[in-house]
Image (tube, rainbow, N blue to C red):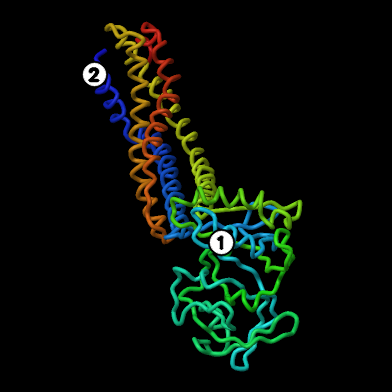
Amino acid sequence: MDPAETLRMSLRAIGSHRIRSSLSAFGIVIGIAAVVTLATLGTSLQADIVSQVAGDSAPNMYAWAGQSNGQPGASAQPVFTSHDVTAIRSLDGVADVVPRGFVATASVTYRGNTVSQSNVVATTPAKFDGQEFAAGGPFEQGSRQVVLNPLAARMFDRTASVGDRVTVRLSDGRRVEATVAGVLNSSQGTDQFEGQSSVPRVYVPTDPFYGQTVESPSQGVDQRVYPLLTVVAEDHEDVPAAKRQVRRYLRRNSDAATLRPDAYSFHVRTDEDLVEQVREILNTLTTFVTSIAVVSLVVASLGIANVMLVSVTERTREIGIMKAVGAQNSDVLQLFLLEAVLLGVFGSLFGVALGALGGYLATEYVGLPLVFAVEWVPIAVVVGIGVGVVTGLYPAWSAARVDPIDALRYE
């Protein structure tokens, strides 16, 4: 039978039973629309989170010694001596090393208003490179100064500003008078150690606030020891090589290798590592959610199979006439199989269009930037065709096996 004639007859058969054909294809429409909508929502969420995590990130690496490779800095132990900081800073491709520690405190007082504060962050002025200040600027190393984020500046009865005096009460009872050198422009965390959370943070210079020391195994003298290091590469292209060098130094030649507890291991993570981890988690979540929508496609396949079986029964006499005038089994098989495939194609196309609209509305409602899951469109169409083929095979095979004599007698 001529393919064009087969197509014409298939379209005529579908058109003569519009409601039944539409209802059978509706399951595919809903299934494909659900898959495309959820995939678009997942892709948009991934793009939004990755852009927040990566942003215009600096070529940074984050090093610590801990028990697991989970949250950066989790269970970090103070093992990096001042000698390690200097040695890592001299590695090829490394521009700077920013140590970070924590000073245990009881409270911070401003103009007679005392607020509980369990610790302050001790670091160097390089911590604030590239960060914007609402007022003032970084503190000076060796000075009694502090830098506040906006939440910390506003945690008193009156907002602290540059030049004001605050009193930091240490956990051992000592009180340190300090001057506010600057107030940051944002309270959101700026690196992997701080995460994306917005909490009050008070930053102080390691000299003179940070006093945790240990005897350097390589130098034989007491030195400051830090739990966290931010290693800044000279450029983004230098990050992979610098990361390898930092790992090699820490494992072989560092004081930290001696001071590290046996149950702990070194971790050096870049911003790209975190972005890739986020992508993997979101991809897994998106795949899981969209796979649930595939259940509706299974239901849709049963609907198409039912419609095609009913169609074979209703058209038994037509099949007998076709065979009586010379139609072969392959012609009948081709005709009914094409009808099932067309239902799958129509359902897929309408499903993709409805899914695109659903994805747009979902991202607008949630407030995410729309990133359409283009890669799911050909998958959706192929799935729709596949459903049509699989569900149409048995009805088409049944139609092809109809005996023409029995068919002509059928009422």
Looking at the image, which is closer to me, 244 or 398? 244
Name the disc covering residue 230, or none: 1
Residue at position x 46%, y 60% from top?
58
The quarter of the rendered structure image containing the N terminus is: top left
Alpha-carbon neighbours of circle 1 within 10 Å: few (<14), some, or many (≥20)? many
- The mark closer to the camera, 1 or 2, is 1
Mark 1–mark 2 CB contact (< 8 Å): no
Residue 8 sits in quarter: top left
Relative to 102, does residue 37 appear above or below in the rendering? Answer: above
Q: Is residue 102 left or right of residue 244?
A: right
Q: Secondary structure at mark 2?
A: helix
Q: Position of residue 295 (x, y in %)?
A: 51, 38
Q: Amino acid at mark 2?
A: Glu
Name the disc covering residue 5, or none: 2
Name the disc covering residue 348, or none: none
Relative to 198, does residue 72 appear above or below in the rendering? Answer: above
Residue 156 sits in quarter: bottom right
Q: CA distance from mark 1 to mark 2?
A: 71 Å
Q: Position of residue 212 (x, y in %)?
A: 71, 71
Q: Amino acid at mark 1?
A: Thr
Indicate which disc, 1 or 2, sits on the residue closer to the N terminus. Answer: 2
Residue 80 sits in quarter: bottom right
Residue found farthest to the bottom: 112
Residue at position x 36%, y 43% from top?
374
Alpha-carbon neighbours of circle 2 within 10 Å: few (<14), some, or many (≥20)? few
Relative to 293, does residue 399 appear above or below in the rendering? Answer: above
Q: Position of residue 301 (x, y in %)?
A: 46, 31
The quarter of the rendered structure image containing the C terminus is: top left
Residue at position x 39%, y 20% from top?
312
